[in-house]
Amino acid sequence: MTNLGDFRAYLPDLSLPRFVVMAKQDPYEYSASFKTKKQPPWLHALYTHWLKLFQEPFKGVTTDGNVVPGLFELEDDGIPIDNIVASAAKLLDLLDNKQKAATLHHIDSPEWRTWSNPEFLLSIKGVRLEELSDLARDAVMNVLKITLSPEGFEKAVAAMRINSFLGDLVKAPVIMNEWSYNFVIFGTPSSNRPWGWQFYGHHLCLNVFFYKSQIVISPWFTGAEPNIIDEGPYAGTRILAAEEQLGLDLMQSLPSHMQSQAQVYKLMKDPAMGPGRWNKDDQRHLCGAYRDNKVIPYEGIVVSTFTSAQKKFLYEIYEKYLLFLPESARKAKINNLRKYESETYFSWIGGYGNEDPFYYRIQSPIIVIEFDHHSGVFLNNQEPAKFHIHTLLRTPNAGDYGMALRPLIPPIEGAEGTPILWQ
């Protein structure tokens, strides 16, 4: 088995054409080359599949194709919405007209759904941080800082720095660096009308919806390859270790008969898996980019059967997966999750020894979280390893992007008294 510190044994041969070409291209050339030349074929096939999924009307992640109504309501999460709006306004003041036009999208724009976590630009929208002035870039980061919890902001910055570390490892810093991320605003920043922002790039994608003092951060994706920096100015930076350890602690705490129930597949790429249960890009996780309407039946074991000690691990996992939320919103979400323990399932793929790579999912009517150890994309480990991790969160039953809340928001009236839902 591979361990965290082993990633340097899997550094790729940078003389391979893939890396030679990559080192010579800018992000737009890099993206265009695989779209037009259809290389590599599996990646182009993924791209075309994503385009087909994008054409589907939004429904949301469900267990059976049917959205459960009435799960979400308007509430006061106590977020500093006035400060967030002011930070967004400051950013917009620093952008020129072309940048502003690229950044601002309608609140109901389908472009909400075109985020993706690979290093190549599939959807080119918003402003790219590496192309901004220092002042404007700092203003984008300030929007993130004021919106997210301090711990969540620190995690996001760490993911960006690890992305830059990977870019240096494979000699492609133009494609992967600390600032190779796009920022988009949907709607008009407002203290009393709905709006939101999106931040996306390699291994970090955040979708944030606001209405007054309420916040939804979903879907989000956070990953790392490797998930530790072992040299340079940010040496020691590491992410996703707690999510990994807590999942393993929970699985190991279960008695053997419950472990057997939770473990839906023994191998990470198991012959018993049905068609589509594993794919080259997402590997085991199900709720990634463009999977807004994914149907995911419950599997594993119901968490209401856990002991108090096992539930403690569960709620510590929730804390880590809700870390991007400000503390007041996080507490409200966790209190809501307690209501659904009898409908919440914990499932596992792979072994559960200390050195085993694994996948786990926690799924309820109001949350889906996934953790997956991956094989190499830039590093050349052929099997899943603990130094390459993907994590994500979805709010099922139309909760992503705040969609379930939007019909609950009172409309405003236009000049002629005509109801207008959004600005």
Image: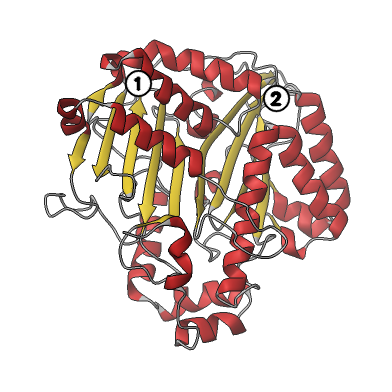
Residue 61 is marked as: none
Q: Is residue 186 visible?
A: no
The image position of residue 159, as x and y in percent, is: 60, 52
Element assignment for label 1: helix
Kind of residue at disc 1: Gln
Specify the farthest residue to the left. Answer: 272
> Against 288, is 15 above or below?
below
Kind of residue at disc 2: Arg
Closer to us: 329 or 213: 329
Closer to us: 37 or 162: 162
Based on the displayed image, in which of its 4 quarters is residue 317 positioned?
top left
Element assignment for label 2: loop
Alpha carbon distance from label 1 to label 2: 41 Å
Question: Where does the N terminus fall, quadrant-wise?
Answer: bottom left
Residue marked by disc 1: 310
Residue marked by disc 2: 193
With 384 as the anchor, is 300 left or right in this view?
A: left
Residue at image location 73% in from the left, 58% down from the top: 129
Residue at image location 57% in from the left, 72% down from the top: 169
Q: Nearest to the eye among marks 1 and 2: give it.
A: 1
The image position of residue 250, as x and y in percent, is: 35, 29
The image position of residue 381, as x and y in percent, is: 36, 68
> Against 413, is 269 above or below?
below
Residue at image location 75% in from the left, 25% down from the top: 81
> Against 55, is 341 above or below?
above
The image position of residue 141, as x and y in percent, is: 75, 46
Residue at image location 19% in from the left, 26% down from the top: 258
Question: Where does the C terminus fall, quadrant-wise?
Answer: top right
With 39 as the anchor, is 33 left or right in this view?
A: right
Q: Is residue 201 visible?
A: yes
